[in-house]
């Protein structure tokens, strides 16, 4: 999963781009739910939020490092519960 750092300027552009509804407004800035972020695996070749973020504040979440297989399994799990 990816995460949003405090450099986020709350510009709102990433939220509608996420195919997994993983992004929402947190207490001070936007946050990514690691249970829903597949790094866009299953939907797109590149993380869509990273593509649109104007301040490049969306790195990998070091507490949620996942393999491509794990990300694909998460994608499939989310499809079933959608
Ligand atoms: Fe959503 Fe993809 Fe960004 Fe993860 S990488 S938060 S799935 S847009
Ligand atoms: Fe924050 Fe970047 Fe999302 Fe804008 S695109 S709300 S700056 S994380």
Image (cartoon, grey):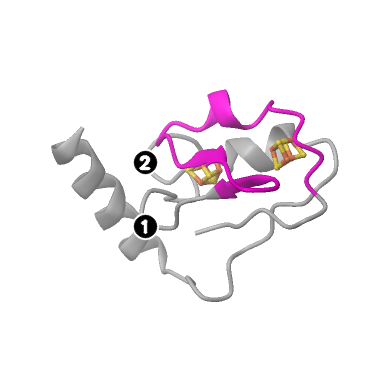
Q: Nearer the viewer, residue 16 or 26?
A: 26
Residue 52's image quarter?
Answer: top right
Which quarter of the image is occupied by the C terminus?
Answer: top left
Badge 1 local density, few (<14 within 10 Å), some, or many (20+)?
Answer: many
Against 35, is 42 above or below?
above
Against 46, is 6 above or below?
below
Which SS class for mark 2? loop
* Residue of label 2: 42
Q: Residue at x 49, y 35 (%)?
A: 44
**On the rendered structure, is 72 left or right of 28?**
left
Q: Quadrant of ligand 2?
A: top right
Q: Is mark 2 within 8 Å of ligand 1?
A: no
Q: Residue at x 43, y 69 (%)?
A: 66
Q: Earlier in the sequence, mark 1 or mark 2?
A: 2
Q: Residue at x 60, y 35 (%)?
A: 48
- The percent coordinates of residue 24 (x first, y second) are 53, 38
* Residue of label 1: 71
Residues in magenta, as a range: 8-31
Residue 15 highlighted magenta (yes or no): yes
User: Looking at the image, how many numbered discs can be counted on the residues?
Assistant: 2
Q: Of all residues shown, which one is farthest toward the bottom?
A: 63
Q: Residue at x 14, y 39 (%)?
A: 80
**On the rendered structure, is 13 left or right of 77?**
right
Against 1, is 78 above or below?
above
Q: Of all residues shown, which one is farthest toward the left?
A: 80
């Amino acid at each position: 999963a990816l995460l949003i750092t405090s450099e986020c300027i709350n510009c709102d552009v990433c939220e509608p781009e996420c195919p997994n509804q993983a992004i929402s407004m947190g207490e001070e800035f936007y946050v990514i739910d690691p249970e829903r972020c597949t790094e866009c695996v299953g939907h797109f070749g590149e993380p869509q939020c990273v593509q649109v973020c104007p301040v490049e504040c969306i790195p990998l979440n070091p507490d949620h490092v996942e393999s491509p297989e794990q990300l694909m399994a998460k994608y499939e799990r989310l499809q079933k519960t959608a």
